[in-house]
Structures are given as structure tokens and as C-alpha cells.
């Protein structure tokens, strides 16, 4: 069922983050590309919230500080130094990265700042050893044209990438430090994107534009997008860290549906007379005794490990916790995600799903009795030690009160199935304070003029130029650019290969082979060149290209020449071909054909496909029939 | 080229801004935190809250906090306008409410002298400045009240490179007073740069104290989430409250992690790294103890016990001692210079086993004959001086240079300052310098690369 995004007032803002492939990291001289060739280091740390310079503590920071945790950091001395370990002040900002950011800014017609102030963005989930991410605004304003719309740009920033989570254990998170400090460019748009598809297109265009600098990193995790999604009526969520562009439309669609359903629930709850006070008035009740002879394996295991079952009556909520349409969006899931994020307690069981989980009708009745809950009411059960279970139920109340009040303002994480889950409250501006270890950097007008003079061509310009110069379709050119094969393409054309063949070989043929599971990326480009040189010299035919590449991918280290010979694609000597042509012409003339060219070519192609270029054969046939 | 900055009497300063900018801001009555709009001659506009000027930012730039929370610097050429949009609150540190204290716990007093552990960003200059009071520390690190009833006071608010021997005496007198009043432990927060000098000084003044006297600092300022201030202070307070010894100690991180704190003897510790949390190392000695997971693990036996009745208080330092480091072509003129300035004692950081160039011998002989004490330590840091091995060393010995065994050179200097206050004759000075007073030397040398504690 389609949604009318416009009538819901959908507005999406994007933050596109992309790693740079500069020589070194943003605030130290460690390499961006890891080698793992040094010594392993491991250490354990804790983080505590710090106040911003305005004397406020950010809600997202408080959220993390509620969950007292230890952080185990691992790194290799070839890839990290004392800066990543937060054992040495940052070095001055990497000017190569600043130039890339300014380049992107100028390509977007943004206005660079006069002076760059590095800030500390407090992040105490452990992903930064310092407890903050260093970040600075490089430019503001500008726009990007997508389709027939100009999407305004809010800011372009340069920041350090965070450490990567390796493992989450009880009370402890393990991080790999290699990624920490890699320069990231962040382009954020105004919240003026109005459909999920448009969001994907804008993200793609921004990504392409960043790539035009030639200084961005590729591969898994090198691009991450944050989405700010809002619909009318106090609903704004931030979905952080979407890696696949293709997931973006379904995530936005999911969020729109989820937010509108929460809004509907909000009015439904109010209709039923469920108020904040009614939620608060009910206290958690220990229900462990009701399960002393339980047949539920789930409950039994937890009870054996000493957990309690604690429940909470939810007045007038009967039937509202399950999904109304069998879809993934349901109040039960909202509550469970929220509880898990704040307290780490897994598995909130609600009345709309029992009997179930082995919990019997009789036990349900008993729970209802103990909770003093009628058929109109719902209830939730959580298991854990008494204190944690009560803390979890407190969060259940909090979430429901949030829904009643109809304000949705939070940070969510994308899931692989195109849905999202609650992650934490949204951070405020209170989490930014100045990084005093790095003096401000003046961006002079003269320096900017230099950057402007070195600006790379924009993608559209490159596409248009290649298209007209080589008479290719715009789509083929876009593919060449997308796969970073423009230089290779130009080399093949320089050899004398027809542009359309070169382009489709480098895009479609290679893609098909890859789809068949062949590792064509492992074949050195020099082997391709050697093969096409043989084609140009008449030693083999371009039609052999696909098989030769497949052979090279299967037989690592072999040469193009070897592949041509082994596959039997080596061209016969010209005299031999001419003799065959003459014999065929003779044969078809005798059998009464008026125009022998067609049938002779047919026979020749059968015999010489992949060995002699079709154009060469056609020329020879024309010569010999004269 | 010489840059001359002339500040006239009439010049105003607003939030660190001077000259034309200050005039513009004052005319509009703009202060730090106010929301302003800046209109540049080229038509560009910026809105944000005025931040104090960054110390090393050029004169015609202002700092604005824009809505997203980021600060940016804006160049304001002649003809720019600043319009005040709304009054704001100036950034200030707001202390969380202090925890409720339990008077039945051991009483520990935290004396604050400044340094990174007690520092925050100074929004006036953008630099880290000592600004946190000891009460602030208690509010920010309430865990310390779980192990002790805390009293806190600020004695100084300085960086440790500005510390003086008079200040060592002030601290020592303060601690002595607390001991006399029956405190159970004393924690002194201190800048790390010269914390080991102060630790040595207190060790000579407060001999065999009945309670632990713990110096503690931080290598990352306490306004950062990753600061080592909290873990170090929690450990220091626990040691102050519960350690079974009465010693002057310095406790800081053992490694890069927050999980192990090491307790060094005040006279056996040296700052060995400019920035890392594990900057302090025990030199030529095992540390006294470790602190891990709330437990104190003793390494050294035979410490002065808590409640010891052998306590004595010997305050006073002379400023007539110096420390010089010898380097290969160094000339002995420096000795003459110091002798002419009235210096009464010199500690040399010599090479290897305790040597200086043979060209120094005549000068050294002369100044020692004039009654100046010359003590030899080694720039190797680790190991003991031994001037009997090479002929140069033997000649230095014969002219009266005093080998100072395995004493750390900084500790030797502090000890000499302390000794010169209580001995006037050279022989007397010499006698005290080679006598073990506060664990600053040892006859036995132990291997240096030993893991003093198992995993
Ligand atoms: Zn590094």
C-alpha cells in the first residue's frame, strides 16, 4: 500500500559521511590503510560524561553514562599511535584532508568558513578513546542539483572516524582502533527532501561529487549516511549509519509508517482515556510465584538462574501491543527495543502474545489476578534480577508515556531488513565544545583561490565530455565512472580498441563474469592491455576477451598470451585464412549462390570466432571476391 | 621583523577581543553568550552566539557558536556590522550537587594545588587552565565519598612548573596541621610536570608520617570524558583512607588502561613520558603497591606503618642548590657562574657511571675547595653511579665530588635544597647527602625490567 508522503509532510535531511584516502589520518601521521604488521596492544578504559562549555550535559551522553561499561581497545602499532590511544595530544589537522573538504565545498558552491575551529563532540559509547569525536565545520550553504530540484546544503564538515565495535560482552564493549582517526567528510543537506527515492538520489549525487575529488576511500564501511526524518506533528528521528544506498527508501518508508502509527496510537490511547498518571499509578509486581510450576522452558531457565518475573499492568491497553496488520510495526516492539537499549534487559513479554512462549492460560489468569488487571488492560512481564527488572519496567512506563504525549525524537539504528530500532535519545548541541589542543586554522582567500584553481571536473561535466568525445551512451559512461574505470577505458581506446567495445567490456562483461563468481579484480590490468595489444596486432580476436579474462581469473599469475594459446584463440597465419576464404568462395560460387559474401562470412565466423577479428575477415572476403 | 603591540590605557577588551572588534562589540553591548548577527561588507551574514576569543586567533576574527553547536571563526573586515539579537548566558561550569557524606568513614582531606587534574578549558583563552576546586572534584567524582569522608580545600591554583620550594613548605605545613588534627589520609592534587619534585620534598619534610600522604595528578584534563583524573583520584582517596602504611607516595596509572594504578615511593619516582597516562615510573626501585579493582596490593614490605609514632616534621628548603646536565663539549664555565652567584651546592647529571670531561677537574677542585658541595648522579636515569671503575671517575672522587649512589637527579637536587637548610659545613652537607633519609637511595640494585606483579 502506497503512502502519500506529501500529505504526511515528510521531510528528510541527509548527512553523507565518506572516508578519505589521504596519506595519513586526520590528527596524526598513522596510515589510513591498515597493514597490521606491528605489535598488538590492548587496554581497558572507562568514560565519564563531561559538561559542554555552556554548562549543560547532553541527553545522549547521559544515556550512555547510565550504562556503566568498560571499553576494551585493541590496535596494532603499525596502524595506531598514542594519538588514537588518547595518550598524546592530537597533531595539527591534516591539510590534505582540509583541501579535499574545501574542494567538495567549492563543488557544492558552499561558503568556506574564514577560520576552522575544531570541536569536541562528546560521544561516550566508547567509539572514541577520548570520549569525543573531533569535528569542524569547513563550509556552510550551497546546494546540489538532483533531477529538477536544488537541494540546499547546510554544512560540510571534516571529522575523525570512530573505532569499530568488535564485540559486545556483558558490561564490556571491545573496539578495534584501526579506523579511529581516518578523515571523514560529512555533507549535510537541509531537511528538504520529500520522498524516499529522492533521498537515495541525493545521497548518490553527493557521493559521486565527493568521488570526483579522487581522494575518497572505497569499499565496505567507507560511506555512511545518517537520515533525519520528520513528519508533521513533533516527530523527528535520526537514523544513523545507513551503509547501503538501496536500503534508504525502505528505511524512510518504514519510519514514516512507524511514526504515523505511533501518532495514531497516541490518539487512540487518549480516546481510551490512558493518561500519563494512569501509567504511573501502576507499580511493578513480583510475579515469580505464579510461575513456580511453569511449563515454559524460557521462564524456567531464567528462574533457575535466580531471575525474578516482574510484571506491570497497563490500563486499557488490551490489544494495542501487537501489530494491527501482522507487519513489523507494533507497540510491543517499540517497548522492547527501548527497554533493551536503556537497561540491556532482553525479552519483554506482553499480554497480546500470551498464552505463548509456553506460558499457559492458567498462568495468564493468575498474572492478571495478581496485577489486578481486567480484560481491557494489557500487561508486560520482564525477567531479571529484581532491581534490573524493575528498572526495565520503569522504562516501559517511560516509553508508553512518550507515545501518549506523541513526541518522537530519538536516534535509531538501521537494520538489514529495512526497518530500524531504537538506539538512544537524540543528542543536543550541548555536546560540542572546543578542542583546545588544536589552534584554529585560518582559511585565507589566497589559499582558497589555489583550491579553486585545482578543482576537479564535476561528474556531470566528465560524463558529458566522455559521451560526446567517444559517442557513447550516457549510461555506459556513468557505469565507467561508477566503477572507476575511466582511465582504463581511455588506455584501451588509445590502443585502437573501438570505444563502444572497450566500454562494454570494462563494465558489462566484467560485471557478468563477477556475477558468475569470478574474481576478475585480481587480474592485473596489464594483462588486459596485453590481450588487447594482441587483438590490435591481429594475433587474436577481441571476441575472445570474455574467455581470456575468465581464464586469467581462474589461473592466477598466468599471462594473457598464455590464456590465448591455451584456449586456442591464437589467430592462424594470414596466408592460411586467405586459402580457406578462396576455397569457400569457390565452393559457394559453384553451388550457384549469387552473393557469396554472407554465407562465406557465416562459415568463417564459425571457424575463426575469437581467433580472427570479424572486421578483418570481412575485409579479406571483400578483397578476395573482387 | 619586530612586531610591536601597543596597548593604550583607553583600550577596551570584550571577551578577549581588542581594538576595533572590542569597540564594535562594546557599542552594541555584546557579551560572551549573546546571540548576534554579523553582516560583512560583502553581504555575507552569520548568526550565532558570541564565544570568547581564541588565544592565538588573528585580531580581526570573531568566534561564533552557530545553531548546530559548532564554533566557526569569522573574519570581520572594516565595515562589518554586529547586531545583538538576544541576550545570552555566558558559558560557565555548573557543578552537580555534591554527594551526601558518611562521617563514619575515614577522613581524607584533598588539597588542591592545581594542574591538569583540577583543570578545565578556559573559555577566555581556549587553553586548559586550573579552575576546578576540590569541591568540584567531589561533585564530579562522587565515588570518592564511598570510601572516605572528604574535606577539600584549594591551596594553590597553579601549573606545576610554577611550583617553588616555598610552596613545598606551605603544602608540608598544611599536611602537618592535618596530621596533628587526626586526619586519616591526605591526598594532594598536583600538576604532573613537577609532581615528583614535590613528592621528594614532602618525603624529606614529613618523615615517617602516621598516615598516607598521596600525590596524584592527571595526564588528561578532567573536563574530558576520558580523563584519568577520576580513576587516579578514586585510587588516591582509597589509599589515603585505607592503606596500612604511612608514607609519602605518588599514585598514577601503571599502563595505558584505567584498570591498574601504581603507588610509587615519593623519592623514587620520575616523570618519564610527556603525555601518556603511565608517565610516572619507579626508578631503581620497585613500586610500593598497586591498586586494582578497589584492592590495594602491597609489593614492598617493611613500610612505615599507619599510626607510626616515629613521625617528625623538618620543614625548610634552601634555594642555593642547582642541577646541571653535562654534555660532551660542555665547558666548566657554568660552575664558575654558579659559584659567583652564591650557590652552595651543585648536583651534576653526569654521563654513564658518573663522569664529566677531564677538563672540568681544575674548576671542580677549586669550587669544592671553596666549600661548594658537588654531588654526582647519572643521566642514564637507571642504575647507580660508580666512580671507581674509570680513571676519570677516580680523579673526580679524589678532588671531592660526592657520588650519590642510585639517587634520581631531581631527588638529589631536592634533597640538597633540604640539606643546605640544616647544614652549613661541607662535611656536614656531604654526610647528610649520602645518608639514607627518606628511602631515596638503596644499597641493592634490582633488575629494572621485571613485572612486579603477576597477571
Ligand atoms: Zn596515530
Image (cartoon, rainbow, N blue to C red):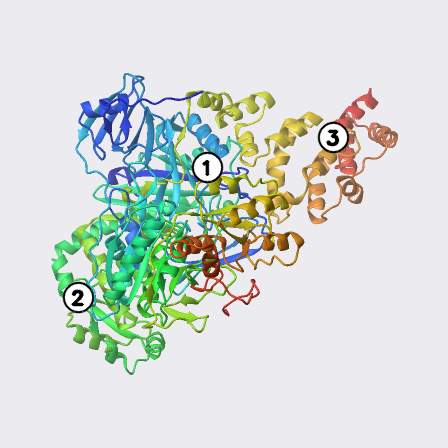
Q: Chain of mark 2?
A: A
Give me the C-alpha separation between circle 2 and circle 3.
80 Å
Q: Chain of mark 1?
A: A
Secondary structure of the residue carrying numbered label 3? helix
Category of crowding for the residue at label 2, using alpha-carbon neighbours closer than 10 angstroms: few (below 14), some (14–19), many (at least 20) = some
Report which quarter residue A246 is drawn in: top left
Instruction: Give the camera-side residue of B297 and A289.
Output: B297
Which of the two discs, 1 and 2, labels the residue nearer the N terminus?
1
The answer to whether A26 is drawn above or below residue A307 in the figure is above
Q: Residue furthest bottom?
A: A293
Say which of marks 1 and 2 sits in front. Answer: 1
**Does residue B141 appear in this view?**
no
In the picture, the disc for residue A614 is 3
Q: Which residue is mark 1?
A: A92
Label 1, residues with CA under 10 Å away: few <14, some 14-19, many ≥20: some
Q: Which residue is mark 2?
A: A377
Between A486 and B235, the one lying in front of the other is B235
Q: Is residue A308 left or right of B441 when viewed as pictured?
A: left
Which of labels 2 and 3 is toward the front? 2
Residue B334 image position (x, y, % from top left): 52, 40
Q: Is residue A472 left or right of residue A384?
A: right
Q: How far across and down, in percent of the image, does residue B111 sit?
A: 28, 56
Q: Position of residue A277 (x, y in %)?
A: 12, 59
Disc 3 residue lies near ligand 1 with CB under 8 A: no
Indicate the chain on which mark 3 is placed.
A
**Residue drawn at the location 51% of the way across and 31% of the way down:** A213
Q: Is residue B354 above or below residue A98?
A: below
Secondary structure beneath disc 2? loop
Closer to the observer: label 1 or label 3? Answer: 1
Q: CA distance from mark 1 to mark 3?
A: 61 Å
Q: In the visual, does A397 lie left or right of B120?
A: left
Amino acid at each position: 500500500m502506497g503512502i502519500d508522503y506529501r500529505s504526511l509532510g515528510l521531510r528528510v535531511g541527509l548527512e553523507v559521511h565518506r572516508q578519505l584516502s589521504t596519506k595519513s589520518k586526520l590528527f596524526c601521521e598513522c596510515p589510513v590503510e591498515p597493514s597490521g604488521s606491528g605489535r598488538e596492544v590492548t587496554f581497558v578504559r572507562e568514560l565519564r560524561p563531561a559538561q559542554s562549555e555552556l554548562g549543560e550535559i547532553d541527553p545522549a551522553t547521559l544515556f550512555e553514562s547510565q550504562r556503566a561499561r568498560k571499553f576494551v581497545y585493541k590496535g596494532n602499532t603499525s596502524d595506531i599511535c598514542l594519538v588514537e590511544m588518547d595518550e598524546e595530544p592530537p597533531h595539527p589537522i591534516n591539510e590534505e584532508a582540509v583541501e579535499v573538504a574545501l574542494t567538495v565545498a567549492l563543488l557544492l558552491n558552499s561558503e568556506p568558513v574564514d577560520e576552522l575551529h575544531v570541536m569536541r563532540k562528546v560521544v561516550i559509547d566508547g567509539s572514541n578513546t577520548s570520549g569525543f569525536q573531533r569535528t569542524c565545520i569547513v563550509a556552510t550553504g550551497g546546494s546540489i542539483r538532483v533531477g529538477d530540484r536544488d537541494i540546499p546544503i547546510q554544512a560540510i564538515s571534516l571529522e575523525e572516524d570512530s573505532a569499530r565495535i568488535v564485540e559486545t560482552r556483558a558490561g564490556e564493549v571491545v573496539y578495534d582502533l584501526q579506523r579511529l582517526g581516518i578523515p571523514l567528510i560529512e555533507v549535510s543537506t537541509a531537511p528538504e527532501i520529500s520522498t524516499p527515492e529522492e533521498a537515495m538520489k541525493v545521497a548518490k549525487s553527493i557521493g559521486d561529487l565527493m568521488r570526483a575529488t579522487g581522494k575518497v576511500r572505497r569499499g565496505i564501511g567507507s560511506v555512511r549516511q545518517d537520515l533525519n526524518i520528520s513528519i508533521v506533528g513533533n516527530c523527528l528521528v535520526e537514523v544513523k549509519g545507513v551503509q547501503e544506498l538501496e536500503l534508504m527508501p525502505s528505511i524512510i518508508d518504514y519510519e514514516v509508517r512507524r511514526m504515523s502509527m505511533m501518532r495514531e496510537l497516541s490518539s487512540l490511547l487518549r480516546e481510551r482515556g490512558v493518561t500519563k498518571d494512569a501509567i504511573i499509578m501502576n507499580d511493578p509486581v513480583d510475579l515469580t510465584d505464579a510461575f513456580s510450576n511453569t511449563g515454559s522452558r524460557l521462564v524456567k531457565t531464567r528462574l533457575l538462574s535466580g531471575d525474578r518475573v516482574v510484571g506491570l499492568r497497563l490500563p486499557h491497553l488490551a490489544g494495542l501491543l501487537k501489530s494491527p496488520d501482522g507487519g513489523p510495526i507494533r507497540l510491543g516492539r517499540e517497548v522492547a527495543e527501548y527497554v533493551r537499549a536503556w537497561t540491556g534487559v532482553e525479552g519483554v513479554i506482553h499480554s497480546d502474545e500470551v498464552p505463548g512462549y509456553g506460558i499457559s492460560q492458567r498462568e495468564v489468569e493468575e498474572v492478571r489476578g495478581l496485577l489486578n488487571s481486567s480484560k481491557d488492560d494489557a500487561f508486560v512481564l520482564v525477567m531479571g534480577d529484581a532491581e534490573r527488572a524493575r528498572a526495565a519496567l520503569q522504562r516501559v512506563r517511560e516509553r508508553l508515556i512518550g507515545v501518549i504525549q506523541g513526541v518522537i525524537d530519538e536516534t535509531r539504528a538501521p537494520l538489514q531488513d529495512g526497518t530500524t530500532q531504537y538506539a538512544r535519545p537524540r543528542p543536543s548541541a550541548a555536546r560540542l565544545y572546543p578542542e583546545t589542543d588544536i589552534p584554529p586554522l585560518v582559511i585565507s582567500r589566497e589559499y582558497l583561490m589555489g583550491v579553486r584553481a585545482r578543482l576537479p571536473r564535476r561528474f556531470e561535466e566528465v560524463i558529458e565530455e566522455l559521451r560526446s568525445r567517444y559517442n557513447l551512451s550516457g549510461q555506459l559512461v556513468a557505469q565507467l565512472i561508477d566503477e572507476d574505470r575511466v582511465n582504463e577505458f581511455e588506455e584501451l581506446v588509445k590502443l585502437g580498441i573501438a570505444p563502444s567495445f572497450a566500454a562494454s567490456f570494462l563494465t558489462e562483461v566484467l560485471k557478468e563474469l563477477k556475477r558468475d563468481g569470478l574474481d576478475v579484480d585480481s587480474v592485473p590490468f596489464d594483462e588486459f592491455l596485453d590481450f588487447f595489444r594482441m587483438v590490435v596486432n591481429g594475433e587474436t580476436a577481441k571476441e575472445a576477451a570474455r574467455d581470456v579474462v575468465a581464464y586469467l581469473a581462474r589461473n592466477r599469475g598466468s599471462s594473457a598470451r598464455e590464456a590465448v594459446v591455451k584456449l586456442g584463440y591464437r589467430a592462424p597465419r594470414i596466408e592460411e585464412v586467405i586459402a580457406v576464404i578462396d576455397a569457400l568462395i569457390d565452393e559457394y560460387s559453384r553451388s550457384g549462390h549469387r552473393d557469396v559474401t554472407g554465407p562465406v562470412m557465416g562459415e568463417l565466423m564459425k571457424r575463426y570466432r575469437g581467433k580472427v577479428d570479424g572486421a578483418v575477415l570481412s575485409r579479406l572476403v571483400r578483397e578476395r571476391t573482387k | 621583523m619586530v612586531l610591536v603591540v601597543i596597548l593604550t590605557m583607553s583600550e577596551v577588551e570584550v571577551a578577549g577581543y581588542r581594538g576595533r572588534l572590542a569597540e564594535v562589540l562594546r557599542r552594541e553591548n555584546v557579551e560572551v553568550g549573546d546571540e548576534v548577527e554579523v553582516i560583512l561588507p560583502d553581504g555575507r551574514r552569520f548568526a550565532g552566539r558570541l564565544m570568547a576569543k581564541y588565544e592565538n586567533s588573528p585580531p580581526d576574527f570573531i568566534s561564533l557558536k552557530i545553531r548546530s553547536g559548532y564554533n566557526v571563526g569569522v573574519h570581520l573586515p572594516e565595515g562589518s556590522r554586529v547586531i545583538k539579537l538576544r541576550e545570552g548566558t555566558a558559558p560557565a561550569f555548573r557543578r552537580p550537587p555534591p554527594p551526601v557524606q558518611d562521617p563514619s568513614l575515614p577522613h581524607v582531606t584533598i588539597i588542591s594545588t592545581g594542574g591538569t587534574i583540577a583543570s578545565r578549558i578556559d573559555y577566555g583563552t581556549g587553553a586548559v587552565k586550573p579552575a576546578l576546586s576540590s569541591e568540584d572534584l567531589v561533585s564530579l567524582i562522587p565515588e570518592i565519598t564511598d570510601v572516605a569522608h572528604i574535606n577539600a580545600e584549594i591551596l594553590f591554583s597553579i601549573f606545576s612548573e610554577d611550583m617553588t620550594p616555598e610552596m613545598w613548605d606551605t603544602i608540608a605545613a598544611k599536611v602537618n596541621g592535618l596530621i596533628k588534627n587526626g586526619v586519616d589520609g591526605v591526598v594532594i592534587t598536583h600538576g604532573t610536570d613537577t609532581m615528583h619534585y614535590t613528592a621528594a620534598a614532602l618525603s624529606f619534610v614529613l618523615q615517617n608520617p602516621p598516615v598516607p600522604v598521596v600525590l596524584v595528578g592527571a595526564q588528561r584534563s578532567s573536563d574530558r570524558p576520558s580523563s584519568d583524573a577520576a580513576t587516579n583520584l578514586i585510587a588516591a582517596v582509597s589509599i589515603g583512607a585505607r592503606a596500612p602504611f604511612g608514607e609519602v607516595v605518588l599514585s598514577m596509572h601503571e599502563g595505558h588502561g584505567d584498570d591498574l594504578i601504581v603507588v610509587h615511593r615519593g623519592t623514587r619516582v620520575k616523570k618519564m613520558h610527556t603525555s601518556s597516562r603511565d608517565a610516572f615510573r619507579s626508578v631503581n626501585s620497585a613500586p610500593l603497591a598497586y591498586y586494582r579493582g578497589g584492592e590495594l596490593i602491597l609489593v614492598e614490605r617493611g613500610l612505615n606503618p599507619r599510626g607510626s609514632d616515629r613521625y617528625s616534621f623538618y620543614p625548610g628548603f634552601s634555594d642555593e642548590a642547582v642541577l646541571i646536565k653535562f654534555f660532551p663539549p660542555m665547558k666548566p664555565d657554568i660552575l664558575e657562574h654558579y659559584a659567583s652567584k652564591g650557590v652552595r651546592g651543585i648536583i651534576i647529571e653526569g654521563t654513564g657511571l658518573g663522569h664529566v670531561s677531564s677538563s672540568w677537574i681544575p674548576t671542580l677542585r677549586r669550587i669544592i675547595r671553596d666549600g661548594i658541595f658537588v654531588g654526582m648522579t647519572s643521566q642514564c636515569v637507571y642504575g647507580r653511579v660508580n666512580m671507581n671503575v674509570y680513571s676519570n671517575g677516580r680523579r673526580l672522587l679524589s678532588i671531592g665530588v660526592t657520588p650519590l649512589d642510585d639517587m634520581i637527579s631531581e631527588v638529589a637536587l631536592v634533597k640538597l635544597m633540604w640539606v643546605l637548610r640544616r647544614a652549613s659545613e661541607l662535611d656536614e652537607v656531604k654526610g647528610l647527602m649520602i645518608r639514607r633519609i627518606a628511602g631515596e637511595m638503596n644499597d641493592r640494585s634490582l633488575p629494572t625490567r621485571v613485572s612486579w606483579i603477576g597477571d
